[in-house]
Image (spheres, helix red, strand yellow):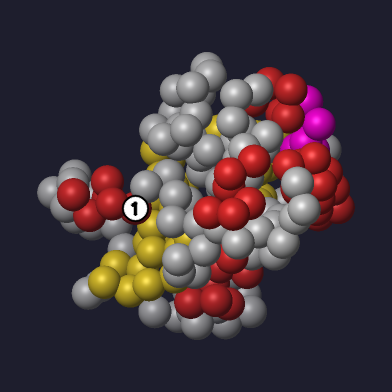
Amino acid sequence: MTKIYFTADTHFDHENIIGHCNRPFKNVGQMNHALISNWNKVVQKKDIVFFLGDLSFNNDDEFLKKLNGNIIHIKGNHDHGTTIIKEVLIKYGGKEWLLIHDSGIFYENKMKYCDIRYVLCGHVHEKWKHKRIKDKICVNVGVDVWNFKPITIQDILTEIGGYNGNGRTTS
């Protein structure tokens, strides 16, 4: 059965991200290896991964070849390759979820997104895992707060307290 995963902010080959985000790696080689290994342990080749931006420092194609899954790459502020998708809307459990790299864009465009209550993003690294702002729930799917691996929608729903075990949100 195909599974769906979410993640962001791997920053492969970005040496400075280790210090900026307090990542537990000695060097960029160790970080790259751990991120690829963690990804491929949970994601199978047939799975779908929504990647919410900032894949690598300068060589997305090299890393995409090493990662399992069918990857839908949403553009982050450090992505300079061929990524052109800026946002994705999905439906799950009767709810619409906006997938975007920077949650700030969501809050700046309130009219465009006024009916959306659930946002998945990256960009904020280790600063927060999820937050609620009025009637909106925003979840950071970045590797820095999810043990350096992709996560499922069930992980997300459990984190925000809205998962009742049958794929439906309770809020």
Q: Give the position of the C terminus as an image quadrant.
A: bottom left
Number of marks: 1
Q: Residue furthest left?
A: 111
Secondary structure of the residue carrying numbered label 1: helix
Question: Would residue 40 be seen by someone viewing this image from the given angle?
Answer: no
Task: Assess disc 1: are there few (<14), some (14-19) or many (≥20) residues with their C-alpha within 10 Å of its C-alpha.
Answer: some
Foreground pick, 89 / 51: 51
Q: Nearer the viewer, residue 12 or 105?
A: 12
Instruction: Please provide percent x and percent y for residue 119.
Output: 39, 57
Residue 2, given in percent of the width and then of the height, sits at: 76, 47
Q: Residue at x 55, y 76 (%)?
A: 159
Residue 145, placed above or below residue 49: below
Closer to the camera in the image, 44 or 95: 44
Q: Position of residue 170 (x, y in %)?
A: 45, 80
Vertical order, 164 against 9 (above or below): below
Please state the extent of the stretch shown in magenta in the rendering.
Answer: 65-69
Closer to the camera, 107 or 88?
107
Instruction: Tell me: residue 140, above or below residue 62.
Output: below
Magenta part mainly helix, strand or loop?
loop
Within the magenta stretch, is there residue 68?
Answer: yes
Image coords of residue 147 (percent x, y): 70, 64
* Residue at the spot 49% in from the left edge and 69% down from the top edge: 129
Task: Provide the residue designation for mark 1.
Answer: 103
Q: Classify residue 49 as left or right of residue 68.
A: left
Residue 135 falls in which quadrant of the image? bottom left
Q: What residue do we see at 26% from left, 72% from top? A: 133
Horizontal side of 16 relative to 171 (left or right) equals: right
